[in-house]
Structure formats: C-alpha cells, structure tokens
Amino acid sequence: MKQETKQIKVLGSGCTKCQKTAELIERIAAEQGVEVNITKETDAQVFLQYGVMSTPAVIIDEVLKHSGSIPHTDQVKGWLA
C-alpha cells in the first residue's frame, strides 16, 4: 500500500536555519523512503495564519509540528514515521 505524499511547509525568512531545516527533512524522508513535497514559505501573513511567532517552523499536512529552531533528527523521523 502506497503512502500519500506528506505536504510539508518550512516557514521562515529564507535564513540558513530555514534552509537547513528543509534539507534535514528532505534527507531523512529520502532515508526512510517517505515521499514528501516540501515548500518554503516566506510570507509573514502565512506565519500568522499558523500562529507561528518564531522561525523556522515546520507544518506537516497543515499541522504545526515545530517552531523556533532547527528540529532534532529524531523529531523529524517521528513526524515521517
């Protein structure tokens, strides 16, 4: 049975931490064989829609999973499991 592609948004200004967060998620998804569609969102209005006050933030399938720092590898693995 094929899993659905996870829709992931990385919210941030485009800073290094935001880029590293997106790269980390892509790498772990590839390692776990999970299909992801990652979009980077830099619009402050979108941050507000999700209630995000600090970036980088990670939204998976429209649910805020993390904000304020680069997530830990184990956290990302848990989200993608």
Image (cartoon, rainbow, N blue to C red):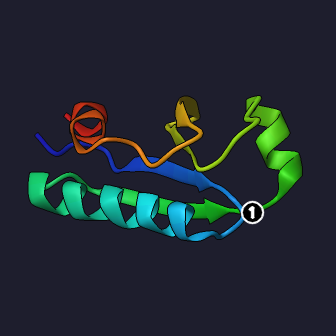
In the image, what residue occupies the spot 52% across and 44% down? 69
Q: Which residue lies furthest to the right in this view?
A: 45
Q: Is residue 71 or residue 36 the one in the foreground?
A: 71
Q: How crowded is mark 1: few (under 14 residues within 10 Å), some or many (20 or more)?
A: some
Q: In this view, does 3 lie above or below 37?
A: above
Q: Is residue 61 or residue 11 the one in the foreground?
A: 11
Query: SS class of the residue under badge 1?
Result: loop
Q: In this view, does 47 lie above or below 14?
A: above
Q: Is residue 26 left or right of residue 54?
A: left
Q: Residue 32 at x, y = what percent?
A: 11, 51
Q: In this view, does 19 lie to the left or right of 73?
A: right
Quadrant (top left/top right/bottom left/bottom right) for the C terminus = top left
In the image, what residue occupies the spot 82% across and 59% down? 43
Residue 13 falls in which quadrant of the image? bottom right
Q: Is residue 49 or residue 23 the one in the foreground?
A: 23
Q: Residue 18 at x, y = what percent?
A: 55, 61
Check disc 1 and give the amino acid type: Thr
For disc 1, the marked residue is 42
Quadrant (top left/top right/bottom left/bottom right) for the N terminus = top left
Q: Residue 39 at x, y = what percent?
A: 56, 63
Q: In this view, does 75 lie above or below 69?
A: above
In the image, what residue occupies the spot 43% across and 65% down? 20
Q: In this view, does 72 lie to the left or right of 74?
A: right
Q: Residue 25 at x, y = what percent?
A: 33, 55
Residue 16 falls in which quadrant of the image? bottom right
Q: Is residue 79 above or below residue 3?
A: above
Residue 64 falls in which quadrant of the image? top right
* Badge count: 1
In the image, what residue occupies the spot 55% across and 29% down? 63
